[in-house]
Image: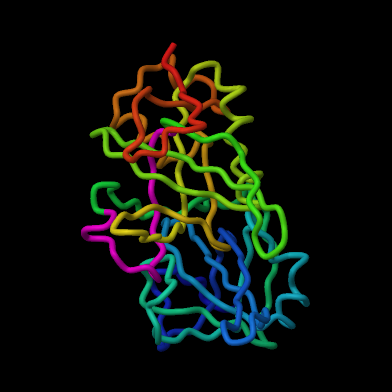
Amino acid sequence: MDIVLAISQLTNRVQGVIHARVFKIWQAIDTKNNNVWGMNFVLLDKEGDAIQGVMPINIYRRMKIDFVEGNICEIGRFTVEHIKNSAFRTVKHDFTLYFSGQTYVTPLAPDLHDVHVCYFDFKRLEDIGTKITDEKQPFDVIGRVSHFTTIQEKLVNGKLTKMQTIYMTNESGQTVEMTLWAHFVDELDIDGVYAKSNNQPIILACSSVMLKPYRGKYSLKAYDATRFYMDRGIKEMKEYLESVHCDDTAIQNTDAIVSNEGSPSNAHTQNIDRIKIS
């Protein structure tokens, strides 16, 4: 019987299986021809540790029924190698997991395993553009949605594409903007969230956003690995709410979220829908 290893134990010198949740999956694209050659993924275990991995697209097609975001699986017969390129790394683990034709994935009963739901390594909004300057290094942020623009349509590559800007503010008043394009506008659906918020603070956690420098200023952008979270039942969300001293009435509704009224950190004041405090 194979030894069940913790993700923190994974190196190129150990062998065994892991019991882990599939946190996220996104396409691995060849930048030379824009073809999808494989799938990247992140796995989490019950200790809260995470590791990033990759598999060829033909392997993913074989196991995609079981290898689904949110599923908890036993995974075996993989290989582990030291990170060769730190660009686009979404977790802190020093090794990468590789799936091959020998790798197997077996679903496990979710009620039998206390495995973490999300992985975050939040960075301070104050560090964006100072300590955080690498455009190829994803990072996580959390804050209150203080403003957002109306949805607009822009002509991109001959197609009308949705665009919307979100402003996030932290407990010290630091604000950063994030412009969303195309399907990310619908995925976040900040208009729908605000309509249902009943004037409760909207807290947004973003996993794996990228830095976007423009004319000496820095903003955030989403890409394939980006995920948005507003569920107040998530441990990290609860901890953030406690750290900013939100009272009980502000966190009763797990589907609601909101912010403070104030001005954005730049001059983009047109089409701003202010989120007001009741």
Who's the residue at 46% across and 26% down the image? 258
Q: Residue at x 41, y 16 (%)?
A: 277
Q: In which quarter of the image is the C terminus?
A: top left
Query: In this orientation, which residue lies closer to the viewer: 245 or 117?
Result: 245
Would residue 247 appear left or right of 61 to someone viewing this image? left
Residue 40 falls in which quadrant of the image? bottom right
Query: Going 33% across and 55% down the picture, which residue do you hit?
Result: 218
x and y percentages locating residue 65 in the rendered image:
78, 65
Above or below, comparing residue 252 to residue 102 in the picture = above
Looking at the rendering, the stretch of residues picked out in magenta corresponds to: 128-145
- Residue 14 or residue 276, whichever sits in front: 276
Q: Observer-nearest residue: 130 or 230?
A: 130
Residue 108, placed above or below residue 122: below
* Residue at the (64%, 58%) spot, across then down: 69
Colour scheme in use: rainbow
The percent position of residue 112, horizontal first and vertical second, equals: 61, 50
